[in-house]
Amino acid sequence: MRSTAVDTDSLRLLIVEDMEDDALLLVEHLRTGGLSFDWRHVDSAGGLREALSEGGWDIVLSDYSMPGFSGSRALEIVRERDPDVPFILISGAIGERAAVEAIKAGANDYVMKDNLARLLPTVDRELREARLRRQSRAAEQERSRLAAILEATPDLVAILDRGGSVRYLNRAGRGLLGLFDQSGDESLSLTDMFPERVVRRLTTEIFPYVRREGAWTGETALLHGEHSELPVSQVVLAHRDAGGRIEYLSTIARDISEHKRFEAELEHRASHDGLTDLPNRHFLIDRFTSALQRARRHGNYVAVLFLDLNNFKRVNDSLGHAAGDALLREVALRLKSCLRPNDTVARHGGDEFTLVVDDLSRAESALAVLSKLNTAFSTPVDIGEHEVYVTFSTGIALYPHDGDNVDDLLRHADTAMYRAKSSGSSQYRFYSPEMNARGQEFLLMEADLGRAIEQQEFCLYGQPQIEMRSGRVVGVEGLIRWRHPQRGMVPPTDFIPLLENSGMIIPVGEWVLREACRQHRSWRDAGFDSQRIAVNVSAVQFNDADFPGKIRRALREEAMQPQLLEFEITENVVMQDPVGATELLCELHALGVRTAIDDFGTGYSSLGYLKRFPLDVLKIDRTFVSDLDTDQGDAVIVEASISLAHKLGLEIVAEGVESARQLEFLRQHHCDLAQGFCLSHPLPEQDLQALFPRIWS
Ligand code: C2E
Ligand code: MG
Ligand code: MG
């Protein structure tokens, strides 16, 4: 059997012929030629239609002229159903023109009956070509299915030629690029699709890699409209021809902006404080590290400020946590308003904030930040129906003076902040190296303080207060001393801050109160029953809810008249929390004890403000008194303080009077009481009573 290019096993042949003999002749001829097939013969339109509806015909051989039917009609019917099946006319007499017409109408060839030698090669060729047509039609269908998928996919798909021009871009791609109104035929280049930096990366890095390795995957960005970008995850593939040469590249890009937003949100949460949305400690350290790197390069200064809110605990305790949170949020906003774009403010935890001020050309510029902070917090913060004045204790460390790395600088700012806090509120301190040395010493002392109460190492000295009119001792200020077994007499300024920081001031303060009441009882026993005794109260004690209770018990136990007991509070303690202070001062007033503002003039208060508090005494700070002889300005302040105090109905005490001239000035300006070294130093209990009968002239 001769072989053909076509798989002939299931070959099916349809013959349209009115003469059955002619049909057999054809079959005979083809079989003799070696073709094996099944066949059927029809001779009318109806028969042809019926046969076609069976389907599966590989070739149609049709007579040209038949009575009542024709080859051209048969062709029409065949083409209606199947555009691909080869149709060959077999005719005894077909004119040239008719043959051309038939070919135009879709016949594949024609063979003359008297030249049947052409039939077999013709059939053979047409079967082969039909098969190719079918294959290419299937390929075309496959291609258009793939194209439909590409057009429907939500990812960008593009084909790039070797020169990098975009040969195909799917619909989603046009959407992602913001080219909604462009048809797919518009020619695009890489620069129409990608931001400049991505184009650079594609051409210098990614494409060369793909040419070597075949594929690249990673994250890039697409242009989206004129001004924005879209982050994408991208795949680039190289496609080679049969010879292994790269024919074109394709790329798929998926919009990952949602994912990126989510990632950014997570990152933000990990690096920011949930309550205030300020950077947290981790983020601060990052920013601080890069600020130091910049400063190293440019020879600039960096300041780090440690801020501790002074009255926060009280707000939280008295107004509730919601109010505390609201206060912290407002503080965060105001702090931010003080900074320039490169600066950082972070919440360090609780009520502590850290500011990193970048790029200072002079170390002194850190002061400008302090002054901005002062202005930002000069008005009270509204929380609900309450107004709270916010003050900070601030420690400052400077790069490069105080350290060249983040850890040291933060630690030193923290140390300076503690120093500021212990020297009274609303203070700032620049770090100094002695602070560390002092810090070591403080640590040792702190340990010793633990046993000082048990070992009865504290004692209470008294400094007389003299009434200027009469020259008599009308009162005594109790001043604590620590008789340290090794260090000797330690002054209160060295250990009170330690007691305050550790909370030990509460029991020690209570001891002072009881000791004062006890001494007073012994004076009365000795016949001195009109002298007053004053004790100093620190901020921590002032915030102790049981403070009034302790006073009540001490008075009761020593059977003491309350108006002979006085409490000295510095104005800063009062101004830290005016609302809470008013409450407590009213409570003390109701107990009948006297209250004095100590160190007046050094803090932030004004007499106008003090008018609102129930007070009895104002003590002018000794720095104004000691400069009375030399500083005209201080004389004016002292004079004004005296007359304003009198207008407010307050008694006024000048403390730290060291000279007769100062005493004379105070007498002339009607100061009520004086206290100072020129009258008497603070004295131990046993020496004090001897002064009571004395009259100073
Ligand atoms: P303060 O309440 O302002 O006490 C007055 C301070 O001035 C005392 O210092 C006193 O010795 C000193 N002074 C008195 N006259 C003169 C003078 O003419 N010239 C000079 N330069 N100084 C004079 P001291 O005893 O060292 O106390 C210092 C501070 O320690 C007190 O300042 C007070 O704030 C605090 N303090 C003392 N005792 C206690 C206490 O029992 N509890 C608390 N919380 N603080 C106390
Ligand atoms: Mg005092
Ligand atoms: Mg004082």
Image: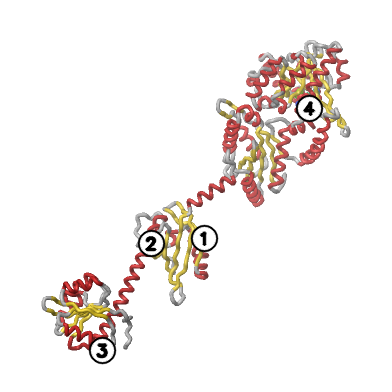
Say if 508 sits above or below 233 in the image.
above
Indicate which label's residue lies in the foreground, 1 or 3.
Answer: 3
Quadrant in the picture for the C terminus: top right
Image disc number at residue 149:
2
Residue type at mark 4 is Val
Residue drawn where x is 88% and y is 32% of the image: 485
Percent position of residue 69, x then y: 13, 76
Residue type at mark 2 is Ile
Question: Can residue 668 be seen here?
Answer: no
The Cα–Cα distance between marks 1 and 4, rounded to whole angstroms, is 67 Å
Question: Can residue 203 be seen here?
Answer: yes
The Cα–Cα distance between marks 1 and 3, rounded to whole angstroms, is 66 Å
Where is mark 4, residue-wise?
Answer: 508
Residue type at mark 3 is Thr
Where is mark 1, residue-wise?
Answer: 218
SS category of the residue bearing label 1: strand
Percent position of residue 592, x then y: 71, 14
Say if 625 sits above or below 337 in the image.
above
Does mark 4 have its CB less than 8 Å from ligand 1? yes
Indicate which label's residue lies in the foreground, 2 or 4.
Answer: 2
Q: Nearer the viewer, residue 654 or 456?
A: 456
Residue type at mark 1 is Gly
Residue drawn where x is 77% and y is 27% of the image: 507
Does mark 3 have its CB less than 8 Å from ligand 1? no
Query: Within the displayed image, which quadrant is ligand 1 positioned in?
Result: top right
Local crowd size for mark 1, using a 10 Å CA cut-off: few (<14), some (14–19), many (≥20): few
Where is mark 3, residue-wise?
Answer: 32
Indicate which label's residue lies in the foreground, 2 or 3.
Answer: 3
- Choose the circle earlier in sequence order: 1 or 3: 3
The Cα–Cα distance between marks 2 and 3, rounded to whole angstroms, is 50 Å
